[in-house]
Amino acid sequence: MFGICLRYAASHDEAQDILQEGFIKVFEKLPSYKGTGSFEGWIRKLFIHTAIEKYRERIYHLPMGEITDHQLSLHHNQAPDMLHTKDILQFIQNLPAQYRLVFNLYALEGYSHKEISKALSISESTSRSNLSRARMLLKEKLNKESELILRVV
Amino acid sequence: MKEHYIDSRFREELAGLEANPPVEAWMAITDALDVKRKKHTKFTLFKTAAALAFLLVATFSFWFVALNEQTPVNEFQIGQAMPVPMQALNFDSFSSSGTRISALNKKQINQHSHSLVASAREDNEHAFRANNTSIAYIPTPGIAALITHMPDVQIPVPASQSKSVITTNHYNYQVDLAASVATARSKKSSISLGIHMAPQYNYRYLTQTSQSLYDDIPFQSLEQQIYSYSAGLSAHVRLSPNWAIQTGLNYNNTGQFIQGIVSYHHPDNISLYSDFQYVLTSLGGVRVHDTYNHFEDIQSTRILTARSMSFNADVDKLNKTTEGITQTFSYIEIPLVLRYHIYRQHIGLEVKGGFSGNYLVRKDVFLGKNMFQSPIGETLGVEQFNFSVIGGFALNLPITSNIMLHVEPTAQLFLHPVVIDGLRVSNAVPYNLSLHTGFSYRF
Protein backbone atom coordinates (compact mmCIF):
# COMPACT_ATOMS: atom_id res chain seq x y z
CA MET A 1 0.00 0.00 0.00
CA PHE A 2 2.93 2.30 0.58
CA GLY A 3 3.60 2.05 -3.17
CA ILE A 4 0.14 3.46 -3.86
CA CYS A 5 0.73 6.23 -1.35
CA LEU A 6 4.01 7.12 -3.03
CA ARG A 7 2.31 7.44 -6.40
CA TYR A 8 -0.27 9.86 -5.09
CA ALA A 9 2.11 11.89 -2.96
CA ALA A 10 4.53 14.61 -3.89
CA SER A 11 7.08 13.44 -1.35
CA HIS A 12 8.02 10.56 0.89
CA ASP A 13 6.69 12.43 3.92
CA GLU A 14 3.35 13.06 2.30
CA ALA A 15 3.15 9.38 1.36
CA GLN A 16 3.69 8.50 5.01
CA ASP A 17 0.85 10.81 5.98
CA ILE A 18 -1.46 9.13 3.49
CA LEU A 19 -0.36 5.72 4.74
CA GLN A 20 -1.09 6.67 8.33
CA GLU A 21 -4.51 8.15 7.65
CA GLY A 22 -5.32 5.29 5.28
CA PHE A 23 -4.59 2.65 7.89
CA ILE A 24 -6.58 4.48 10.54
CA LYS A 25 -9.49 4.53 8.09
CA VAL A 26 -9.06 0.80 7.48
CA PHE A 27 -9.29 0.07 11.21
CA GLU A 28 -12.23 2.38 11.67
CA LYS A 29 -14.20 1.07 8.72
CA LEU A 30 -13.31 -2.59 9.09
CA PRO A 31 -16.72 -3.46 10.57
CA SER A 32 -18.38 -2.05 7.44
CA TYR A 33 -16.48 -4.39 5.10
CA LYS A 34 -19.12 -6.79 3.83
CA GLY A 35 -16.80 -9.26 2.16
CA THR A 36 -18.47 -8.82 -1.22
CA GLY A 37 -15.33 -7.78 -3.11
CA SER A 38 -11.68 -8.50 -2.60
CA PHE A 39 -10.29 -7.26 0.67
CA GLU A 40 -7.24 -5.84 -1.03
CA GLY A 41 -9.43 -3.92 -3.46
CA TRP A 42 -11.45 -2.52 -0.58
CA ILE A 43 -8.31 -1.34 1.21
CA ARG A 44 -6.92 0.05 -2.01
CA LYS A 45 -10.07 2.15 -2.49
CA LEU A 46 -9.78 3.49 1.03
CA PHE A 47 -6.20 4.54 0.40
CA ILE A 48 -7.11 6.21 -2.89
CA HIS A 49 -9.94 8.05 -1.15
CA THR A 50 -7.50 9.14 1.56
CA ALA A 51 -5.11 10.42 -1.09
CA ILE A 52 -7.93 12.42 -2.67
CA GLU A 53 -8.82 13.92 0.71
CA LYS A 54 -5.19 14.79 1.26
CA TYR A 55 -5.11 16.50 -2.09
CA ARG A 56 -8.13 18.56 -1.13
CA GLU A 57 -6.57 19.60 2.16
CA ARG A 58 -3.50 20.83 0.37
CA ILE A 59 -5.27 22.32 -2.60
CA TYR A 60 -4.18 25.86 -1.75
CA HIS A 61 -0.57 24.96 -1.38
CA LEU A 62 -0.33 23.78 -4.94
CA PRO A 63 0.61 26.06 -7.83
CA MET A 64 -1.24 25.66 -11.13
CA GLY A 65 1.74 26.95 -13.15
CA GLU A 66 3.90 25.23 -15.66
CA ILE A 67 6.12 22.41 -14.63
CA THR A 68 9.84 23.25 -14.46
CA ASP A 69 13.01 21.32 -15.09
CA HIS A 70 13.77 21.62 -11.43
CA GLN A 71 10.56 19.87 -10.59
CA LEU A 72 11.35 17.01 -12.93
CA SER A 73 15.01 16.56 -12.16
CA LEU A 74 16.37 13.07 -12.53
CA HIS A 75 19.34 11.28 -11.15
CA HIS A 76 21.79 12.25 -13.88
CA ASN A 77 24.64 10.31 -12.44
CA GLN A 78 22.89 7.08 -13.22
CA ALA A 79 23.81 4.70 -15.99
CA PRO A 80 21.49 4.74 -19.05
CA ASP A 81 19.85 1.46 -18.18
CA MET A 82 19.02 2.71 -14.68
CA LEU A 83 15.85 4.59 -15.71
CA HIS A 84 13.86 2.41 -13.39
CA THR A 85 10.77 2.36 -11.28
CA LYS A 86 12.22 4.85 -8.83
CA ASP A 87 12.71 7.43 -11.58
CA ILE A 88 9.34 6.77 -13.14
CA LEU A 89 7.81 7.23 -9.72
CA GLN A 90 9.65 10.49 -9.30
CA PHE A 91 8.28 11.75 -12.61
CA ILE A 92 4.80 11.18 -11.31
CA GLN A 93 5.56 12.64 -7.90
CA ASN A 94 6.91 15.78 -9.52
CA LEU A 95 3.77 16.42 -11.51
CA PRO A 96 1.55 19.19 -10.20
CA ALA A 97 -0.87 17.59 -7.79
CA GLN A 98 -4.00 18.03 -9.88
CA TYR A 99 -2.34 16.33 -12.86
CA ARG A 100 -0.81 13.61 -10.72
CA LEU A 101 -4.15 12.76 -9.17
CA VAL A 102 -6.02 12.52 -12.45
CA PHE A 103 -3.19 10.57 -14.13
CA ASN A 104 -3.07 8.10 -11.25
CA LEU A 105 -6.82 7.60 -11.22
CA TYR A 106 -7.23 7.32 -14.98
CA ALA A 107 -4.06 5.68 -16.24
CA LEU A 108 -3.08 3.55 -13.29
CA GLU A 109 -6.36 2.78 -11.52
CA GLY A 110 -8.62 2.65 -14.54
CA TYR A 111 -11.21 5.19 -13.43
CA SER A 112 -13.32 6.86 -16.12
CA HIS A 113 -13.45 10.63 -16.50
CA LYS A 114 -17.00 10.55 -15.21
CA GLU A 115 -15.91 8.78 -12.05
CA ILE A 116 -12.96 11.13 -11.60
CA SER A 117 -15.11 14.20 -12.05
CA LYS A 118 -17.46 12.92 -9.35
CA ALA A 119 -14.66 11.99 -6.97
CA LEU A 120 -12.82 15.28 -7.34
CA SER A 121 -15.82 17.58 -7.89
CA ILE A 122 -14.44 18.80 -11.19
CA SER A 123 -15.94 18.67 -14.65
CA GLU A 124 -15.19 15.84 -17.04
CA SER A 125 -13.51 18.28 -19.42
CA THR A 126 -11.19 19.44 -16.62
CA SER A 127 -10.36 15.82 -15.92
CA ARG A 128 -9.55 15.23 -19.60
CA SER A 129 -7.47 18.37 -19.81
CA ASN A 130 -5.51 17.49 -16.66
CA LEU A 131 -4.85 14.02 -18.01
CA SER A 132 -3.60 15.25 -21.35
CA ARG A 133 -1.36 17.82 -19.68
CA ALA A 134 0.01 15.16 -17.37
CA ARG A 135 0.74 12.92 -20.37
CA MET A 136 2.36 15.77 -22.23
CA LEU A 137 4.63 16.63 -19.32
CA LEU A 138 5.59 13.02 -18.77
CA LYS A 139 6.24 12.52 -22.47
CA GLU A 140 8.43 15.61 -22.62
CA LYS A 141 10.40 14.47 -19.65
CA LEU A 142 10.83 10.96 -21.00
CA ASN A 143 12.08 12.35 -24.32
CA LYS A 144 14.43 14.73 -22.56
CA GLU A 145 15.87 12.01 -20.43
CA SER A 146 16.27 9.69 -23.41
CA GLU A 147 18.29 12.36 -25.24
CA LEU A 148 20.38 12.92 -22.14
CA ILE A 149 21.03 9.22 -21.74
CA LEU A 150 22.02 8.88 -25.41
CA ARG A 151 24.44 11.79 -25.08
CA VAL A 152 26.00 10.28 -21.96
CA VAL A 153 26.39 6.98 -23.75
CA MET B 1 -10.22 2.89 -27.74
CA LYS B 2 -6.50 2.46 -28.04
CA GLU B 3 -4.63 3.03 -24.84
CA HIS B 4 -2.18 5.90 -24.71
CA TYR B 5 1.39 4.64 -24.70
CA ILE B 6 2.37 6.91 -21.81
CA ASP B 7 -0.35 5.30 -19.68
CA SER B 8 0.78 1.79 -20.46
CA ARG B 9 4.44 2.64 -20.06
CA PHE B 10 3.94 4.05 -16.60
CA ARG B 11 1.55 1.34 -15.55
CA GLU B 12 3.97 -1.36 -16.53
CA GLU B 13 6.85 0.39 -14.83
CA LEU B 14 4.93 0.88 -11.63
CA ALA B 15 3.15 -2.46 -11.59
CA GLY B 16 5.83 -4.01 -9.46
CA LEU B 17 6.33 -1.00 -7.23
CA GLU B 18 6.70 -2.20 -3.70
CA ALA B 19 7.98 -0.07 -0.90
CA ASN B 20 8.29 -0.58 2.79
CA PRO B 21 7.24 2.30 4.95
CA PRO B 22 9.73 3.40 7.59
CA VAL B 23 9.36 2.08 11.12
CA GLU B 24 8.28 5.45 12.46
CA ALA B 25 5.25 5.34 10.15
CA TRP B 26 3.97 2.21 11.95
CA MET B 27 4.64 3.82 15.30
CA ALA B 28 2.67 6.91 14.25
CA ILE B 29 -0.23 4.68 13.15
CA THR B 30 -0.17 2.82 16.46
CA ASP B 31 -0.13 6.10 18.41
CA ALA B 32 -3.00 7.54 16.38
CA LEU B 33 -5.09 4.40 16.89
CA ASP B 34 -4.39 4.50 20.63
CA VAL B 35 -5.62 8.08 20.82
CA LYS B 36 -8.81 7.14 18.98
CA ARG B 37 -9.35 4.15 21.25
CA LYS B 38 -8.97 6.36 24.33
CA LYS B 39 -11.46 8.83 22.92
CA HIS B 40 -13.87 5.98 22.29
CA THR B 41 -13.39 4.73 25.85
CA LYS B 42 -14.06 8.22 27.20
CA PHE B 43 -17.27 8.42 25.16
CA THR B 44 -18.37 4.99 26.38
CA LEU B 45 -17.72 6.07 29.98
CA PHE B 46 -19.74 9.22 29.38
CA LYS B 47 -22.66 7.20 28.01
CA THR B 48 -22.48 4.80 30.95
CA ALA B 49 -22.42 7.69 33.43
CA ALA B 50 -25.39 9.33 31.69
CA ALA B 51 -27.34 6.05 31.79
CA LEU B 52 -26.56 5.60 35.48
CA ALA B 53 -27.60 9.17 36.24
CA PHE B 54 -30.88 8.61 34.39
CA LEU B 55 -31.51 5.38 36.29
CA LEU B 56 -30.81 7.11 39.60
CA VAL B 57 -33.18 9.95 38.82
CA ALA B 58 -35.85 7.53 37.60
CA THR B 59 -35.44 5.30 40.66
CA PHE B 60 -35.59 8.29 42.99
CA SER B 61 -38.70 9.64 41.26
CA PHE B 62 -40.54 6.33 41.52
CA TRP B 63 -39.40 5.86 45.08
CA PHE B 64 -40.66 9.33 45.94
CA VAL B 65 -43.97 8.66 44.28
CA ALA B 66 -44.27 5.27 45.94
CA LEU B 67 -43.52 6.82 49.34
CA ASN B 68 -46.31 9.31 48.87
CA GLU B 69 -48.64 6.48 48.07
CA GLN B 70 -47.90 4.79 51.37
CA THR B 71 -49.33 7.55 53.56
CA PRO B 72 -51.83 6.19 56.07
CA VAL B 73 -54.86 7.57 54.30
CA ASN B 74 -55.56 6.67 50.73
CA GLU B 75 -58.32 8.18 48.69
CA PHE B 76 -58.87 4.90 46.87
CA GLN B 77 -59.77 3.24 50.11
CA ILE B 78 -62.81 5.41 50.31
CA GLY B 79 -64.77 3.18 48.04
CA GLN B 80 -63.97 0.08 49.99
CA ALA B 81 -66.26 -1.45 52.55
CA MET B 82 -64.89 -0.92 56.00
CA PRO B 83 -66.29 -1.72 59.41
CA VAL B 84 -67.04 1.50 61.13
CA PRO B 85 -67.62 1.86 64.86
CA MET B 86 -70.79 3.85 64.51
CA GLN B 87 -71.08 4.45 68.21
CA ALA B 88 -68.16 6.83 68.02
CA LEU B 89 -70.14 9.30 65.99
CA ASN B 90 -71.21 12.55 67.53
CA PHE B 91 -73.62 13.97 65.02
CA ASP B 92 -74.49 16.96 67.05
CA SER B 93 -71.33 18.57 65.86
CA PHE B 94 -72.70 18.85 62.33
CA SER B 95 -75.22 21.43 63.21
CA SER B 96 -72.92 24.17 62.13
CA SER B 97 -73.78 27.69 61.26
CA GLY B 98 -70.28 29.08 61.22
CA THR B 99 -68.32 30.77 58.49
CA ARG B 100 -65.77 29.22 56.20
CA ILE B 101 -62.99 27.50 58.08
CA SER B 102 -59.55 26.35 57.24
CA ALA B 103 -58.68 22.77 56.49
CA LEU B 104 -57.82 20.54 59.37
CA ASN B 105 -54.27 20.13 60.34
CA LYS B 106 -53.16 16.91 58.74
CA LYS B 107 -50.93 15.87 61.60
CA GLN B 108 -53.73 16.18 64.07
CA ILE B 109 -56.00 14.21 61.83
CA ASN B 110 -53.55 11.41 61.36
CA GLN B 111 -53.23 10.96 65.07
CA HIS B 112 -56.71 9.57 65.06
CA SER B 113 -56.86 6.09 63.81
CA HIS B 114 -59.38 3.42 63.11
CA SER B 115 -62.27 5.27 64.49
CA LEU B 116 -65.07 7.36 63.23
CA VAL B 117 -65.26 10.53 65.16
CA ALA B 118 -66.92 13.83 64.68
CA SER B 119 -65.86 16.72 66.73
CA ALA B 120 -66.48 20.39 67.07
CA ARG B 121 -63.40 22.46 66.78
CA GLU B 122 -62.67 26.10 67.22
CA ASP B 123 -64.05 28.63 64.77
CA ASN B 124 -67.03 26.45 64.03
CA GLU B 125 -64.86 23.84 62.40
CA HIS B 126 -66.53 20.50 62.38
CA ALA B 127 -64.89 17.33 61.32
CA PHE B 128 -65.24 13.65 61.29
CA ARG B 129 -62.99 10.90 60.13
CA ALA B 130 -63.76 7.34 59.29
CA ASN B 131 -61.37 4.49 59.66
CA ASN B 132 -58.41 6.64 58.89
CA THR B 133 -59.56 7.18 55.35
CA SER B 134 -61.38 10.41 55.13
CA ILE B 135 -62.09 13.63 56.83
CA ALA B 136 -65.11 15.80 56.47
CA TYR B 137 -65.65 19.26 57.66
CA ILE B 138 -68.11 21.97 57.12
CA PRO B 139 -66.57 24.91 55.39
CA THR B 140 -69.71 26.88 54.91
CA PRO B 141 -73.02 26.77 56.70
CA GLY B 142 -75.08 23.82 55.64
CA ILE B 143 -72.43 22.24 53.41
CA ALA B 144 -70.40 19.30 54.43
CA ALA B 145 -67.24 18.41 52.60
CA LEU B 146 -64.97 15.48 52.56
CA ILE B 147 -61.27 15.72 52.26
CA THR B 148 -58.84 12.91 52.11
CA HIS B 149 -55.17 12.75 52.76
CA MET B 150 -54.87 14.27 49.31
CA PRO B 151 -55.28 17.92 50.23
CA ASP B 152 -56.44 18.84 46.75
CA VAL B 153 -59.56 16.73 47.05
CA GLN B 154 -62.48 18.34 48.80
CA ILE B 155 -65.85 16.99 48.07
CA PRO B 156 -68.81 19.10 48.99
CA VAL B 157 -71.69 17.12 50.29
CA PRO B 158 -75.04 18.76 50.82
CA ALA B 159 -75.68 19.06 54.50
CA SER B 160 -79.09 17.60 54.01
CA GLN B 161 -77.49 14.38 52.83
CA SER B 162 -74.42 14.24 54.94
CA LYS B 163 -76.02 13.55 58.20
CA SER B 164 -78.43 10.97 57.00
CA VAL B 165 -76.04 9.23 54.63
CA ILE B 166 -73.27 9.07 57.12
CA THR B 167 -75.45 7.84 59.87
CA THR B 168 -77.66 5.46 58.04
CA ASN B 169 -75.57 3.97 55.29
CA HIS B 170 -71.94 4.63 55.72
CA TYR B 171 -70.89 1.97 53.20
CA ASN B 172 -72.95 3.42 50.38
CA TYR B 173 -71.84 6.86 51.22
CA GLN B 174 -68.24 5.88 50.80
CA VAL B 175 -68.87 4.26 47.45
CA ASP B 176 -70.45 7.45 46.27
CA LEU B 177 -67.50 9.36 47.54
CA ALA B 178 -65.14 7.30 45.45
CA ALA B 179 -66.93 8.45 42.32
CA SER B 180 -67.06 11.96 43.67
CA VAL B 181 -63.33 12.10 44.22
CA ALA B 182 -62.66 12.02 40.49
CA THR B 183 -65.26 14.67 39.83
CA ALA B 184 -63.97 16.84 42.62
CA ARG B 185 -60.38 16.47 41.46
CA SER B 186 -61.25 17.25 37.86
CA LYS B 187 -63.11 20.34 38.98
CA LYS B 188 -60.31 21.47 41.15
CA SER B 189 -57.52 20.87 38.64
CA SER B 190 -59.22 22.37 35.67
CA ILE B 191 -56.30 24.73 35.03
CA SER B 192 -52.63 24.06 35.41
CA LEU B 193 -49.51 25.83 34.23
CA GLY B 194 -46.32 24.07 33.34
CA ILE B 195 -42.78 24.44 32.18
CA HIS B 196 -40.85 21.94 30.12
CA MET B 197 -37.59 21.27 28.37
CA ALA B 198 -37.01 18.62 25.74
CA PRO B 199 -33.89 17.04 24.29
CA GLN B 200 -34.69 16.63 20.64
CA TYR B 201 -33.68 14.58 17.60
CA ASN B 202 -34.12 16.64 14.42
CA TYR B 203 -33.99 15.59 10.82
CA ARG B 204 -36.01 15.87 7.64
CA TYR B 205 -37.31 13.48 5.06
CA LEU B 206 -36.77 14.04 1.37
CA THR B 207 -39.38 13.09 -1.16
CA GLN B 208 -37.83 14.09 -4.44
CA THR B 209 -35.59 16.68 -5.92
CA SER B 210 -37.67 19.32 -7.59
CA GLN B 211 -35.05 20.57 -9.99
CA SER B 212 -33.07 18.20 -12.19
CA LEU B 213 -30.11 20.55 -11.86
CA TYR B 214 -29.44 19.09 -8.42
CA ASP B 215 -30.21 15.45 -9.15
CA ASP B 216 -26.56 14.53 -8.95
CA ILE B 217 -26.18 15.79 -5.39
CA PRO B 218 -26.83 12.95 -2.94
CA PHE B 219 -28.35 15.10 -0.21
CA GLN B 220 -29.52 12.03 1.66
CA SER B 221 -25.99 10.84 2.32
CA LEU B 222 -24.45 14.29 2.70
CA GLU B 223 -26.72 15.47 5.49
CA GLN B 224 -27.27 14.21 9.00
CA GLN B 225 -29.65 14.62 11.92
CA ILE B 226 -28.80 16.97 14.77
CA TYR B 227 -29.67 16.91 18.43
CA SER B 228 -31.02 20.09 19.92
CA TYR B 229 -33.66 21.13 22.42
CA SER B 230 -36.95 22.84 22.85
CA ALA B 231 -38.34 24.56 25.91
CA GLY B 232 -41.48 26.36 26.84
CA LEU B 233 -44.43 27.15 28.99
CA SER B 234 -47.75 25.41 28.80
CA ALA B 235 -51.26 25.81 30.09
CA HIS B 236 -53.68 22.91 30.48
CA VAL B 237 -57.39 23.23 30.83
CA ARG B 238 -59.25 20.09 31.83
CA LEU B 239 -62.47 19.86 29.87
CA SER B 240 -63.74 16.68 31.50
CA PRO B 241 -62.26 13.96 33.70
CA ASN B 242 -60.63 12.46 30.61
CA TRP B 243 -60.19 15.31 28.16
CA ALA B 244 -57.89 18.30 28.41
CA ILE B 245 -56.69 20.96 26.05
CA GLN B 246 -53.19 22.37 26.10
CA THR B 247 -51.64 25.48 24.68
CA GLY B 248 -48.55 27.50 25.49
CA LEU B 249 -45.44 29.08 24.10
CA ASN B 250 -42.45 27.04 22.93
CA TYR B 251 -39.01 27.85 21.67
CA ASN B 252 -38.01 25.08 19.29
CA ASN B 253 -34.76 24.39 17.45
CA THR B 254 -34.74 22.14 14.43
CA GLY B 255 -32.32 21.65 11.55
CA GLN B 256 -29.66 19.36 10.17
CA PHE B 257 -25.91 18.83 9.86
CA ILE B 258 -24.25 19.26 6.45
CA GLN B 259 -21.35 16.89 5.95
CA GLY B 260 -18.44 17.06 3.56
CA ILE B 261 -17.92 20.80 3.78
CA VAL B 262 -14.42 21.60 4.96
CA SER B 263 -13.59 24.98 6.40
CA TYR B 264 -10.22 26.69 6.17
CA HIS B 265 -9.20 29.60 8.33
CA HIS B 266 -6.17 31.87 8.43
CA PRO B 267 -4.25 31.51 11.71
CA ASP B 268 -3.86 35.30 12.00
CA ASN B 269 -7.60 35.76 11.65
CA ILE B 270 -7.34 37.51 8.30
CA SER B 271 -10.45 37.93 6.21
CA LEU B 272 -10.23 35.79 3.10
CA TYR B 273 -13.13 37.09 1.05
CA SER B 274 -14.87 40.29 0.31
CA ASP B 275 -18.01 38.61 -1.00
CA PHE B 276 -20.25 35.77 0.11
CA GLN B 277 -20.12 32.06 -0.28
CA TYR B 278 -23.17 29.87 -0.79
CA VAL B 279 -23.74 26.28 0.21
CA LEU B 280 -26.63 24.39 -1.30
CA THR B 281 -28.56 22.12 1.07
CA SER B 282 -31.81 20.20 0.87
CA LEU B 283 -33.26 22.84 3.19
CA GLY B 284 -32.41 25.81 1.02
CA GLY B 285 -29.34 27.83 0.20
CA VAL B 286 -27.00 28.84 2.99
CA ARG B 287 -25.38 32.24 2.65
CA VAL B 288 -22.12 32.29 4.58
CA HIS B 289 -21.51 35.88 5.61
CA ASP B 290 -18.40 35.11 7.64
CA THR B 291 -15.55 36.00 5.27
CA TYR B 292 -12.91 34.51 7.57
CA ASN B 293 -13.73 30.97 6.56
CA HIS B 294 -13.13 29.47 3.19
CA PHE B 295 -15.26 26.43 2.42
CA GLU B 296 -14.56 23.50 0.15
CA ASP B 297 -17.10 20.87 -0.74
CA ILE B 298 -15.19 17.61 -0.77
CA GLN B 299 -18.01 15.30 -1.81
CA SER B 300 -20.14 17.07 -4.39
CA THR B 301 -20.80 20.45 -5.96
CA ARG B 302 -22.87 22.18 -3.32
CA ILE B 303 -20.78 25.36 -3.11
CA LEU B 304 -22.36 27.43 -5.82
CA THR B 305 -20.56 30.73 -5.90
CA ALA B 306 -17.53 31.21 -8.07
CA ARG B 307 -15.90 33.75 -5.81
CA SER B 308 -12.31 34.86 -5.72
CA MET B 309 -10.12 34.89 -2.68
CA SER B 310 -9.18 38.41 -1.69
CA PHE B 311 -6.28 37.22 0.40
CA ASN B 312 -3.54 35.52 -1.59
CA ALA B 313 -0.29 35.95 0.32
CA ASP B 314 0.62 33.25 2.82
CA VAL B 315 -2.15 31.12 1.46
CA ASP B 316 -0.24 28.04 2.49
CA LYS B 317 -0.84 29.04 6.11
CA LEU B 318 -4.54 28.28 5.88
CA ASN B 319 -5.58 25.75 8.46
CA LYS B 320 -8.35 23.26 8.13
CA THR B 321 -10.56 24.16 11.05
CA THR B 322 -13.55 21.91 11.03
CA GLU B 323 -15.74 19.75 8.87
CA GLY B 324 -19.37 20.38 8.25
CA ILE B 325 -21.86 23.07 9.09
CA THR B 326 -25.05 22.96 11.13
CA GLN B 327 -28.17 24.51 9.70
CA THR B 328 -30.77 25.46 12.29
CA PHE B 329 -34.27 26.89 12.30
CA SER B 330 -35.56 28.38 15.53
CA TYR B 331 -39.28 28.83 15.96
CA ILE B 332 -41.56 30.40 18.50
CA GLU B 333 -44.53 28.07 18.54
CA ILE B 334 -48.04 28.22 19.83
CA PRO B 335 -49.41 24.69 20.08
CA LEU B 336 -52.98 23.59 20.47
CA VAL B 337 -53.10 20.03 21.68
CA LEU B 338 -55.86 17.74 22.87
CA ARG B 339 -55.01 15.23 25.56
CA TYR B 340 -57.00 12.15 26.51
CA HIS B 341 -56.52 10.05 29.62
CA ILE B 342 -56.21 6.39 28.71
CA TYR B 343 -55.01 5.23 32.12
CA ARG B 344 -55.26 6.81 35.52
CA GLN B 345 -54.26 5.38 38.81
CA HIS B 346 -51.66 7.12 40.85
CA ILE B 347 -49.74 7.60 37.62
CA GLY B 348 -51.62 8.90 34.61
CA LEU B 349 -51.08 8.14 30.95
CA GLU B 350 -52.44 10.35 28.21
CA VAL B 351 -52.33 10.37 24.43
CA LYS B 352 -52.02 13.76 22.84
CA GLY B 353 -52.39 15.20 19.39
CA GLY B 354 -52.72 18.61 17.83
CA PHE B 355 -51.03 21.20 15.74
CA SER B 356 -48.83 24.18 16.18
CA GLY B 357 -48.38 27.55 14.52
CA ASN B 358 -44.69 28.28 14.22
CA TYR B 359 -43.04 31.64 13.65
CA LEU B 360 -39.44 31.55 12.45
CA VAL B 361 -37.20 33.77 14.55
CA ARG B 362 -33.73 32.54 13.60
CA LYS B 363 -32.25 30.60 10.69
CA ASP B 364 -28.62 30.48 11.75
CA VAL B 365 -25.86 28.34 10.37
CA PHE B 366 -22.91 27.30 12.53
CA LEU B 367 -19.47 25.88 11.93
CA GLY B 368 -19.23 22.22 12.84
CA LYS B 369 -21.76 20.96 15.33
CA ASN B 370 -21.31 23.69 17.91
CA MET B 371 -24.51 25.70 18.08
CA PHE B 372 -23.19 27.84 20.92
CA GLN B 373 -20.66 29.68 18.74
CA SER B 374 -21.46 32.76 16.73
CA PRO B 375 -23.34 31.92 13.55
CA ILE B 376 -21.40 32.13 10.30
CA GLY B 377 -24.38 32.52 8.01
CA GLU B 378 -28.06 31.97 7.47
CA THR B 379 -30.45 30.08 5.25
CA LEU B 380 -32.10 32.05 2.49
CA GLY B 381 -35.68 31.89 1.35
CA VAL B 382 -37.22 30.21 4.35
CA GLU B 383 -40.92 30.44 5.11
CA GLN B 384 -41.50 32.83 8.00
CA PHE B 385 -44.58 31.03 9.18
CA ASN B 386 -45.20 27.33 9.27
CA PHE B 387 -47.58 24.76 10.68
CA SER B 388 -46.74 21.45 12.20
CA VAL B 389 -48.64 18.50 13.62
CA ILE B 390 -47.84 17.10 17.04
CA GLY B 391 -48.52 13.70 18.54
CA GLY B 392 -47.33 11.63 21.44
CA PHE B 393 -47.87 10.29 24.90
CA ALA B 394 -47.70 11.85 28.32
CA LEU B 395 -46.81 10.12 31.54
CA ASN B 396 -47.94 12.14 34.55
CA LEU B 397 -46.46 11.52 37.97
CA PRO B 398 -47.82 13.44 40.98
CA ILE B 399 -44.99 14.81 43.09
CA THR B 400 -47.16 16.70 45.54
CA SER B 401 -50.86 17.39 45.55
CA ASN B 402 -50.35 20.35 43.23
CA ILE B 403 -47.18 19.58 41.35
CA MET B 404 -47.01 17.01 38.63
CA LEU B 405 -43.98 15.66 36.77
CA HIS B 406 -44.58 15.09 33.06
CA VAL B 407 -42.53 12.90 30.76
CA GLU B 408 -43.84 13.12 27.22
CA PRO B 409 -42.37 11.37 24.17
CA THR B 410 -43.46 13.67 21.37
CA ALA B 411 -43.20 13.73 17.59
CA GLN B 412 -43.56 16.87 15.51
CA LEU B 413 -43.85 16.98 11.75
CA PHE B 414 -43.80 20.18 9.74
CA LEU B 415 -46.72 20.19 7.37
CA HIS B 416 -44.91 21.61 4.37
CA PRO B 417 -41.32 22.24 3.30
CA VAL B 418 -39.66 25.11 5.14
CA VAL B 419 -38.14 26.58 1.99
CA ILE B 420 -40.22 28.70 -0.36
CA ASP B 421 -40.73 27.47 -3.90
CA GLY B 422 -38.27 29.81 -5.57
CA LEU B 423 -35.29 28.42 -3.69
CA ARG B 424 -36.45 24.89 -3.06
CA VAL B 425 -34.13 22.24 -4.42
CA SER B 426 -35.96 19.30 -2.89
CA ASN B 427 -39.09 18.53 -0.94
CA ALA B 428 -37.47 18.36 2.46
CA VAL B 429 -39.88 18.20 5.38
CA PRO B 430 -38.33 18.62 8.84
CA TYR B 431 -39.49 16.56 11.79
CA ASN B 432 -38.32 15.98 15.31
CA LEU B 433 -38.66 13.45 18.08
CA SER B 434 -38.37 14.78 21.58
CA LEU B 435 -38.80 13.86 25.20
CA HIS B 436 -40.63 16.70 26.88
CA THR B 437 -39.84 16.68 30.57
CA GLY B 438 -41.28 19.22 32.91
CA PHE B 439 -43.48 20.14 35.79
CA SER B 440 -46.93 21.60 36.04
CA TYR B 441 -48.74 23.27 38.89
CA ARG B 442 -52.45 22.79 39.43
CA PHE B 443 -54.45 25.62 40.82
Image: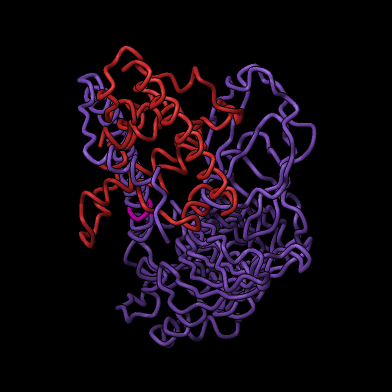
Does residue B242 lie above or below B300 as drawn? Answer: below
Q: Which chain is red?
A: A
Residue B229, percent across and down?
56, 50
State yes or no: residue B62 in magenta: yes
Which quadrant of the structure image shows residue B115?
A: bottom left
Q: In this rendering, would B192 be left or right of A16?
A: right
Q: Which residues are magenta?
A: B60-64
Residue reaching furthest top?
Answer: A77
Which quadrant of the structure image shows residue B160?
A: bottom right
Does residue B273 lie above or below B371 as drawn? Answer: above
Q: Nearer the viewer, residue B111 or B373?
A: B373
Q: In this rendering, would B308 be left or right of A79?
A: right
Does residue A1 lie above or below B92 as drawn? Answer: above
Can residue A68 be seen here? Answer: yes
Residue B188, percent across and down?
61, 69
Q: Nearer the viewer, residue A74 or B35?
A: A74
Measuring 29% from the left and 26% from the top, which residue is drawn there?
A83
Chain B drawn colour: purple
Measuring 31% from the left and 78% from the top, which residue is drawn there?
B82
Which quadrant of the structure image shows residue B360?
A: bottom right
State yes or no: residue B438 in magenta: no
Look at the image and tell me in which quarter the C terminus of chain B lies: bottom right
